[in-house]
Structure formats: C-alpha cells, structure tokens
Image: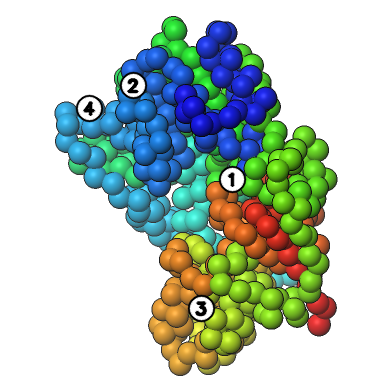
Amino acid sequence: MNTSFSPSKYQADIFNWISHEKGNAIVNAVAGAGKTTTLVEASKSINSNKLFFAAFNKHIVQNLKKKLPDSVICKTIHAIGFNCLLRKFNNTKPKVNENKYRALCREAAKKVHEQLKVQFDNKLATWNKGGNVDEDFPDEPPSAEEVQSQLEKLINLSRCTLADIDSTEDMNDLVSHFSIDCPVPLENILYIVKFILDTGEEVARDSQEVDYTDMLWLTYKWKLKVETYDWIFVDEAQDLNAVQLHLILKMSNDGTRFLFVGDPQQAIYGFSGADSRSFSKIKEDTNAHEFPLSICYRCPKTVVSLAKLIVPTIEENPQAIDGEVIDITELDIIAVLRERDLVLCRSTEPLVRLCFKLLSKKIQAVIKGKDIGKSLVSIIEEMEKLDNFSFNTFLDFANQYQEEKVRKLKQKPDTEKQIVNITDQVASIATCYVSFKCNTVQEFKKELTNLFSDEEAAVTLCTIHRAKGLEQDRVFILYYEQLPLKWEGQKDWQLEQEINLQYVAITRAKQQLYLVSEVAD
C-alpha cells in the first residue's frame, strides 16, 4: 500500500476486511468519497496474480492502468464478453456494428407498416360503405419509424434485462417498467422481436457481426466459458444491468471474493436498462457485507450541507473549504459565467437557449452529447414526412408533430414520461430553428448536429445524466427549483432516480455551486 496514503476510518475498515476476514463486500460510497482511490489502494494489499478490476468505460481503464499494480487485470465488462466471443469464433475478431439491430428493426418495421396500412385501407373502405354513423373513424396505422422505435427498445431492453422473450408476462412487465410506447400491441409484435433476436444470433454465428450488447448477451445465451479470478473488484456497481451482473458473477470460482463499490444514490440510468435495484440485489445475491464510505473529499462544506438534505449520511471533509452555494436567476447567468464553468440542467431545451445566448456574446460553448443531436435530427426527419411539409413553416409542422405524438401517447397507459421527453425534444428543435435562421432543412440538420459535441469548450453545458463522473470548481444548475422532476403517473423508481439526479448535480461542485432559477415570461 502507498506509504504516503493515509486511509480514513472507513477505508481502514475495508482494508482490514480484505486482510483478516472472508466473504464478499459491497461499499456504499457517497459522491466524491474517493472510491476509485480506495479500490486502487486495496488492490496493492492483495497478494494474487488473479485479481480482476471491472471498470465502467475504456477511458477509466486507461487511467486505472497507470495506478494499479501490473499484476491486476483491468478491463471493461464489454471487453470480457468480446474475448469470450473471440474464443467462440476461433480467434476471428468480432466485427462491431452498433447499427446491426437498427437495420433489422427498420426492415421489419417497414413490412409491419405496410401490413397495417392494408388493414387500415380495408377498414376505411368498410367504414365509408357503412354510412359513417355508428362506428368511429378507424385509427391510422403507426408510421414505420414508430414501429421501428418500439422494436429497437424491446430488442435492446430485453437483452439488457435478460427478460424471457417467450414469456408474455415478462415482456409485459418490461413494457410497463420502462414505459415503452407500443403503437403495435405487444401480442401482435412479439413474434417479430423473437425473429429479430434469432436473426441477430444467426448473423453473429455466420459473419461474426455483433453490437456492444451482443458481447454480453450472446455470452449469456450461448453459455460461453469465462476466465475466473481469485478477487474481482467492480466499480459503479449501482449502474449494472442484469446481463452485466450475470457476466461478472460468472467469473467466480469456489474461492473468489468480490469487492463491489457503488452509490445507490447515484443510480440514474434505470431508463436505459440498468437495474434500479442493482446495489441491493448484488448485496443479497452475493451475501456481501456492506461498508460505508461516507466522507466527501470533492465538495466544500456548504455544498455538502445541501447534499445532506437528500443523502443524510454524506459527511464533509474536515479540511474542506467552506465554499459557496449562490442563488441567482437565469437573467444573471451570462454575466457570471466564465471559462471552465460547467452548466447542468435536467432538460435539454434550456441548455440550447443558453448556448445560443453565449455564442451570440462570442463565448465559446458546446452542449455535451453528440448522440442528442442525432436523435433530434431523427425527429426532424420524421417531421419531413408529414403531408405538405415546408421548411418555411417549420414551426407549424413541429407543433403538428408534437400534438399528434402526444395525442397517441395519451391513449395509452404509462406514457407520461414519454410526453415529457417529446415536449422537451420538440422545444429544443424549435429553439434551434429560430436561432439558426437556416434556408434549408439540410442546412438546419447540419447546424443542429454541430451544436452538440463531446469536445471541450470554454463553457460546457450538459444534461445531468451526462454529468456523471464530471466535476468542476464552479457548477451552475439551471432551473434548480424544478428538481426533482415530477410528472403524472410517475413510478416510484422513476421518482427515486430523479432525486438521485438532483444529488448528482449538486455534488459536481468543488468550490461554488450556483442554483439558477427560471424567470417567468
């Protein structure tokens, strides 16, 4: 262990467990508690060349390899699955195509739409013959894009959660839990989901083509062998989904000891397939002893005091500066912002508006997340398919698109969150349209794509979901009074994750935290 490292009382308890006790452990680490440092120092006290460290992404792996002993194997969970497939394919390197299932879903969705269109035309003809008196006008079929979106979500989430595709009950639970919009009733499309998954397996066998989720799911589905280790360290345990956890547990033998570290109050990826109960499930499944790691070394005392309102167990570092929590309005933010500041918001549209204001003042700014720009462009492309679309009256078509989307969603249960999302997305697009003043839709889509970037800028703006792992001296939270975000029909786990988002946002600040309130029009 590093002789210059002085462990806290909480870290000392963990190190003592490693050296003198048996079994598995899980560490409940508050934000900024130095959990990675704890794992690195713990690894130095273990005399084994069979220690595996599972890291969250490649960037973290690269940083950890500079700190960990040479004997420690450090990889992402996806890398484990990739190596399993490499052996399965007789050392033929798997070809990664992240759009693999998207292409399969697009092809299937077109056929479904065509079939539904024929059924609609037949119903319409019958309705016209009947005199239009007693029967309602038949509903128009969903677009191919809507069906494709439904298929993609079912394909991705069923693999991440290891849902039983042959169980209608399991799949209904999946739809309900994740509030998946089903323009085609589940019972009418489930056979297509099975077909696409079977085709995905066949493509992997025949041409070694996989996407990232395949790396984990096919390892599970094909029951592939995984190398085992004496010790397994897992960081960010609160964000594991079912297929990731299955692979981690499969790496154990009779004598393996696990050390998981995570923060259940920072579990914010439940919407994308992460198990919102991951932390408690790991503790239960591995019979792990829970250790606290409660001192926050990142945030000043005033920020920790605010965070305590959400997570009472978080403790300030006695040597921390006082710092400041400052209330301002959105009218003040331009004058206060300076280089290297981080601006967070739960929604995208306020970030878009602020970004344009900064750019107009010649202040370099970007909104973090290239894929957000891509998703907004996809919505614009759906708008282009509306009857008589004209870019000159784009805002009218944006309103028409939103109204139709919301109308359809309101006819189904558990869609309130989707209504919140589509409203934010269309508002973001409308703000961009007004600000860019483009002449063509092609130019507009290009400008919008460039607005979102993962590159550094003088001022970085991002949604709270993308702030995980970030920290900055000065942090601004736009529309803080709206946190935690709530909506009608919100599920308990969704509210819990919204509260977690508020906590994540607060604990990014190292010196000053600005709580920015909205000014009513």
Neighbours of disc 4 within 10 Å: few (<14), some (14-19), many (20+): some
Of tags 2 and 3, the one toward the viewer is: 3
Q: Residue at x 48, y 49 (%)?
A: 151
* Residue 217 in view: no
In this picture, residue 388 sits left or right of residue 314: left
Neighbours of disc 1 within 10 Å: few (<14), some (14-19), many (20+): some
Q: Which residue position holds label 1?
A: 269
Mark sitting earlier along the chain (4/2): 4
In the image, residue 385 above or below residue 345: below
In this picture, residue 486 sits left or right of residue 454: right
* Render colour scheme: rainbow
Neighbours of disc 2 within 10 Å: few (<14), some (14-19), many (20+): some
Q: How far, Cα to Cα, is label 3 from label 4?
A: 47 Å
Mark sitting earlier along the chain (3/4): 4
Q: How far, Cα to Cα, is label 2 from label 3?
A: 47 Å
Give the number of callouts.
4
Q: Amino acid at mark 1?
A: Tyr
Mark sitting earlier along the chain (2/3): 2
* Residue 362 in view: yes
Q: Which residue position holds label 3?
A: 364
Could you tell me if the residues under marks 4 and 2 are in contact, i.e. CB atoms within 8 Å?
A: no
Q: Residue at x 79, y 65 (%)?
A: 326
Can you tell which mark lies on residue 226? 2
Q: Amino acid at mark 4?
A: Arg
